[in-house]
Image: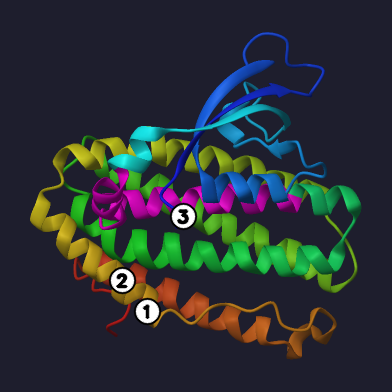
Amino acid sequence: MSGKCLTIKYQCTHPSCQVFCKKGEIDIEESFFNELRSAAKEGDTFKSPSTACRMGFAQVFKVLSVEETREAVDAGSSKEKVNEKDPLWMLSDEHRHVLAKLDVIEDQVRKRDIEGLWESTASVENDIILHAIKQEEGALFPLIESRISMGEGLVAIMKEDHVEFISILHGFRCGLQDGDIQDGLVTSLIVNLRNHIIKEDEEFFPQIDEVMKADERAILYEKMLKIREGHVPLVAGDRKAKGLSPYSEDRRRMDAEIVALKEATSMGDVKCCGAH
């Protein structure tokens, strides 16, 4: 990670954007900006983060100017180290990468790129397993569920969302194995996942941030590192292998992990996912 923060002045190229995001300015990390530029077709454009457009979808933004934010370069090194060890910052940073992948998936759907979608949806499913099932449900939620306002209800909503995302992904990827791109499923996934990320970043995580103590952050950070180190990445496998593909094994393994976490939660004895 470069640590540089850029101020991008842009113009939205979508014809329906007349008021809020026709022209604007956004502060963004250089590494994330590079990801968004790679998702666009022309060198002077980039795909917007979904929350930058009033419609809530990624649009093509034309770059008007790029300036390096001096404060981020001069004082950011120490600040960045603090952020990188903050578990909530880590989770939000993972959100940014997932949003960039959703932009890529949208483009692949338009191009009817089945092989590309087979790889990209496996990558997003892997992110959901590691981020949502293992790090959030396995480590974060048990720590804060009883301490924030309406915590049990909020956690239940987040878990329902996680199950929905996985179900949609499996249904969509089964269609890909048969050579079908199910537009309704992938649209539902993209819209719901973006809304879920907004819900966590703007409502859920700020509540957690207010009640979490420094020592708890340190413990959670170490747990999340162990979870990441012990995670076996989900790989796409051979799309045409159907039931014999590694994907089927990943499905069974993931289902077992979800069941184990649910059982542990019901007994009030949630452990780090690395310890079974």
Given the image, on which type of amino acid does mark 1 rest? Glu
Secondary structure type for disc 2: helix
Given the image, on which type of amino acid does mark 2 rest? Leu
Is residue 215 found inside the magenta-colored segment of the image? no
Tell me where residue 123 appears, x and y as whole percent: 62, 67
Few, some or many residues within 10 Å of mark 2 (<14, 14–19, 20+): some
Label placed on residue 250 = none
* In the image, residue 12 above or below residue 104: above
Residues rendered magenta in the picture: 76-105
Secondary structure type for disc 3: helix
Label placed on residue 225 = 2
For the residues bearing labels 2 and 3, Cβ distance under 8 angstroms: no
Secondary structure type for disc 1: helix
Q: Quadrant of the N terminus?
A: bottom left
What residue is shown with label 3? Answer: 94
Query: For the residues marked 3 and 1, what is the alpha-carbon distance in whole angstroms?
Result: 16 Å
- Image point (43%, 77%), residue name: 257
Few, some or many residues within 10 Å of mark 3 (<14, 14–19, 20+): some
What residue is shown with label 1? Answer: 229
Residue 87 lies left or right of residue 158; in this view the side is left
Query: For the residues marked 2 and 3, what is the alpha-carbon distance in whole angstroms?
Result: 13 Å
